[in-house]
Image (cartoon, rainbow, N blue to C red):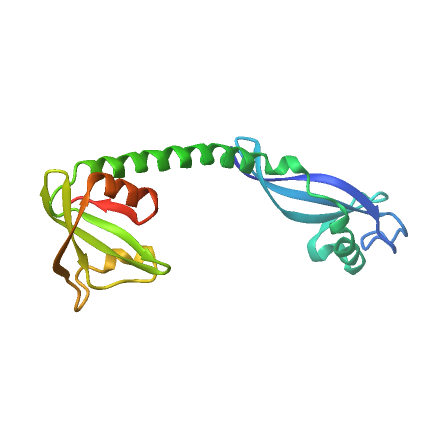
Amino acid sequence: MFYGWRAKDLGDVTVPGACPSCGTPGSVELHVLQRYAHALWIPLFPLGKKGIARCSHCGQKLEGRAMGENARMVLSGVKGHFKTPAWTYTGLIIIIALLIPAAFWQSGKNDALINSMLNTPQVGDLYEVKLGPRRYSLYRVDRISGDSIYVAAYNLEVEKWRQVNGLIGKEGGHFGTRLTGYSRGDMLAMRNDGTILSVRKR
């Protein structure tokens, strides 16, 4: 199978008492198995441990409730003594190792795009801004004159950045008539200090 789960035998312990199938005393060995997910035979991450009881006399294999109360109690007590092998995290480590550089690349690409839009503003552009702790709102570019960009501030604020998208159209919400002028350099500085979080083209 290309994906699914497998199990690795971590070791065994003797279960006190007799085999529930043949009645032979001291013949039951409890094998502790580490279950793990895999894809293309590469371990992805551990799924937990389970036990299989095997009688050395009659060869009967039992698991779950069929193992009997003694074996289940032993399993509960010893599972923690068998450590999860580090290799069961192989796939997870590979995925993280691939995602982190991808995230940095995407972040850098997004930053470059926002900086480009700040350098080439257009009337109607919307700037998502952070005004202070738990204070987020919008600026709209209303006029451009040479190197100066004049923006109107929205009259409503939200406490979380992801809520900014819902500001426009909110009852009582509107952009003010008073305009504030900034240079392109000012805008880039506001981007660098975290005031301008994102830009939406008109």
Q: Nearer the viewer, residue 170 or 120?
A: 120
Query: How many marks are shown on the rendered structure?
Result: 0
Q: As displayed, is residue 172 above or below residue 25?
A: below
Q: Residue at x 26, y 62 (%)?
A: 157
Q: Residue at x 78, y 41 (%)?
A: 11
Q: Is residue 182 left or right of residue 94?
A: left
Task: Find residue 119 and report its horizontal and vertical position in percent.
Answer: 20, 36
Q: Nearer the viewer, residue 173 or 37?
A: 173
Task: Find residue 198 and report its horizontal and vertical position in percent.
Answer: 27, 46
Q: As displayed, is residue 109 above or below residue 81?
A: above
Task: Find residue 144 and report its horizontal and vertical position in percent.
Answer: 10, 43
Residue extending furthest right? Answer: 25
Q: Is residue 166 left or right of residue 59?
A: left
Q: Which residue is drawn at 79% across and 55% down?
A: 74
Task: Find residue 153 and report its horizontal and vertical position in percent.
Answer: 19, 57
Q: As displayed, is residue 94 above or below residue 191?
A: above
Q: Nearer the viewer, residue 25 or 5?
A: 5
Q: In this view, does 8 lie to the left or right of 184?
A: right
Q: Is residue 115 left or right of residue 53?
A: left
Q: Residue at x 74, y 40 (%)?
A: 10
